[in-house]
Amino acid sequence: MANSDQFLEEFLLEAEEIFDQLDQAFVLLEKNPEDKKLVGNIFRALHTLKGSSGFFSFRRIERVAHAGESLLGKIREGSRVLDVTATNVLLQTMDRLRDIVKGVEVTRAEPHGDDTQLLLDLKTLIEGGEVAVSQSLDATSSNPPASEVPPEVGPSESGKSAQPKVSGAPESMVLNKQQPHEPLPETREPAQVEAARNSEVAQPLKVNVELLDRLMNMVSELVLARNRLLSFASHSSDANFSSTVRAIDMVTLGLQTSMLETRMQPISNVWSKFPRLVRDTAQSCGKKVELVQMGSETELDRTLLESIRDPLIHIIRNSVDHGIELPEERLAKGKKETGNITLKAMHENGMVVITIADDGAGINLPVVAQKAVHKGLVTSERLAKMSEREILDLIFLPGFSTKDSVSNLSGRGVGMDVVRTNIQQIGGNVDVTTSEHGTQLRIRIPLTLAIMPAVFVRCGTHRFAIPQNNLFEMVRHKKGSGSLGLENFFGVPVFRLRNKLIPVLILNKELQIQGDDFESKEALNIVVVQAAGICFGMVVDEVLFMQEVVVKSVGTLLKKVSIYSGATILGDGRVAMIFDIGGIAVRSGLISKLLENDFKEDLEENHVALQEGQSALLFDLVNQDRIALPLDYVDRLETFPAHRIERRGPHDVILYGDKILRLIWLSDYVEGKAPSGDYRSENVSVVVHYHKGQPLGFVVKQVHDIVSIPNEIIMLSPPQPGVMGSAIWNDSVVSILNVEDIIRRFEKLESSDSAVPMSVEG
Amino acid sequence: MNISKTYSTFHIEDFYFGILTTDVTELTKENEVTTVPLAPASVHGLINLRGRIVTAINMRQRLGMTQSQYSDKNITVFLSHKGDLFGLLVDGVSDILELDSESFEPPPSNMAHSSQDMILGVHKLADKLLFILDPAKIIDGIELTHD
């Protein structure tokens, strides 16, 4: 009995694989109806399925698969053309088979059902007749109901009402016919085509996941044992021993790397279902959509793969459903008739970045804003202060759904909060950008959850790991006046980080442990982290080091302690806990306290108050006193070696990309400064400012910092050329550069070559 | 009908306990336990057992005995429960005993209620009582004390 159960499991796995292959092959086939090899692959896959079902006496599967196989046989030998009707009936066949197999999975027996109509359709097609597609093709449940399907949908898929076609010449593939200028799919999806074609060649071995996990554990342990061995070897004078240890070291390293690789799987495992999803969704909405996949070989941890599947399906479905416009709308806008969705995956800074971009209508921000107010998610006063980005972010709020305004808004709102939550749970994030040319979602997720970089901190005698994903920065904060050396904001200790107020947790207190003596310290070590949508600081006793950690489960008893996400084993064999930063934020009550006191709002007001000045770049010319340049004029900071400066007419210029950067030696223009020669050293610091589309470079001696200077400017009397006035910053006087004046004078000089700047004259 | 069972025995302070040998995976001493702040009171911390993270249970606390610090000399009885490994921190281990169900009795009713749950029964030995513990009850009964 157990034996046949095992066989059944294998059958189910095999069937699942076959269906994935089939989905992929069918969509490819639709693009290349002539590809006999693909037809052959599908034929063989069905045949395999039929054979296996025979073994279990699954008569329904056998019958349906057999009929499908016969039709494919006709197509393969060329006596029947694969047209839309045939494709649809074949896809129906696949769906039916999938349903039956699903039933088998649940009940362990073949479910009952009526396949008469489907078999009849198949039979008619085999005999060369035509049939009306009698069932909805929706593989997805959330597609709009048939009544919403706009009238311009092609006759092939308009469904129930269509009468049997009498025309003898079958319609060719919709996708192919209308876009003969499209490049061949092979050039875009070589990996896929290859995969589909070679699928019968390389059959990987199935290994139990638990076994892999056990192996992984043993390898980690081996690494620790190797570390101990290495320390022995370093004290040993026995050459044989040392070389043996070295060999063990090498093998262990290799083993560890390979072991990690077993957890990695290409993202195409998830993507393989998408062409079918796009096809079906597009058909039912009456749209023409093409899916382009790039970087499908990008690998990531299989557990992560599993958790991005649903969010991706959701996003893609939204893109087709709401993003891409109807064909005639697109033509009216001057876009290509066929919409395009590009899926792209790549590695970036140790993370996997997945972008889903469509060239649809984009998200209508005013509608989003209106909706959010209407739903009470945000007040209109608050909304007035929000930037476009923040408004766009509203679609991720729970309860924000544009479901009831599907048509006029490219509503991504349907469950986008769930998408974000799912992604955040695995330590990733999502952002969205949109314009009338389309919408792009960018998902960043860690490569693996099994190994991640973390910063270790000490609290009392404990060592804890903080995932680097959550980490913003580490600050050594000089104690101020307040009770903890921190300011107090409605009972929450806060500190100022640049222009922001950051709430702070004293970690020792939160953890109820005895840490270092707080009073005796001069400065606080604050780790600034971000989680659960807020940014906060944690005071720790010491920041230790950064390390890649292998994340392990903490076991059932500690799982309920929300502040930990896992544990790891350190090089010395001891265990350290890994914090769940979101859990800490929630457990400490910080979040509720912040909400209660409207912290966010006040923080922003505070921010504005601090910002009342303007940001400016502080730099030196030659004299001691500093000069400030309003940040609006600063586009880039560059350093050039002096020998790159060339003389062109009256100007010093530097080749800057494909443009010519004209240099303005600021000291020539600012009264009272020493002649320019003084700072023409080996390298010149240049502040690049684009003026009328051309780069201008202000040459300065040294750039110091970006500071906030008050708006209140003390006018100088008499006015100094090149200087707008002075301002007080940090108890000292800084001069504020009059950029407009300098550019005016510079351009004057340009127009009359002979003119010499004022200050040099004087 | 008499059935004999083998027990791994250990002691905590003056009490003598036994667990079915089949439940015990191994016994080791001098395991370093990393304490975990905010953990349930009965969870002493975590042990690295050859790469596996094991939850160490403070048996004194669990059995409601007086608290005294565990030292490195403590011995850990490892057992597997629902796929996870647990370590019971005890003072010392003794023999493996094969005992006949004849000497087995249900737990005395005057025992503290909290520990009564975990004790399956008592074997009356020649010189002392052997309390037979139910590992599942020890572990499942641990609740979060904070939060």
Image (cartoon, coloured by chain):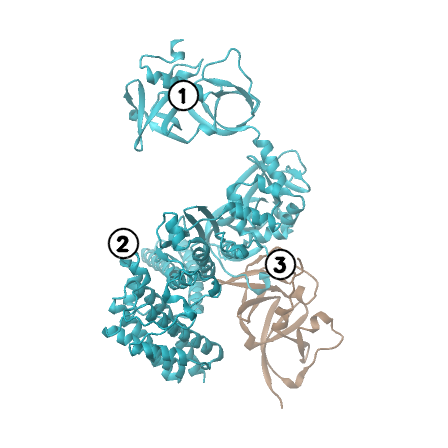
Chain colours: A cyan, B brown
Alpha-carbon distance for marks 2 and 3? Answer: 65 Å
Toward the viewer: B128 or A389? A389
Q: Indicate the chain on which mark 3 is placed.
A: B
Please tell me whether residue A476 is drawn above or below residue A329 in the rendered image.
Answer: above
Quick one: B25 or B42, which is closer to the camera?
A: B42
Both marks 1 and 3 on one chain? no
Q: Which amino acid does label 3 sit on?
A: Ala
Depth order, front residue of A137/A520: A137
From the viewer's perspective, tell me whether residue A175 is left or right of residue A515.
left
Quadrant in which the C terminus of chain B appears: bottom right
Direction top: furthest residue: A762
Which residue bears the numbered disc 3?
A: B39
x and y percentages locating residue A459 in the rendered image: 58, 48
Please name the amino acid that badge 1 sits on.
Ile
User: Where A698 sits versus A591, above or below?
Assistant: above
Earlier-in-chain disc, 2 versus 1 = 2
Q: For numbered disc 1, what is the local secondary structure?
A: helix
Marking on residue A181: 2
Q: Nearer the viewer, mark 2 or mark 1?
A: 2
Q: Marks 2 and 3: which is nearer the front?
A: 2
Mark 2 vs 3: CB contact within 8 A: no
**Callout 2: chain:** A
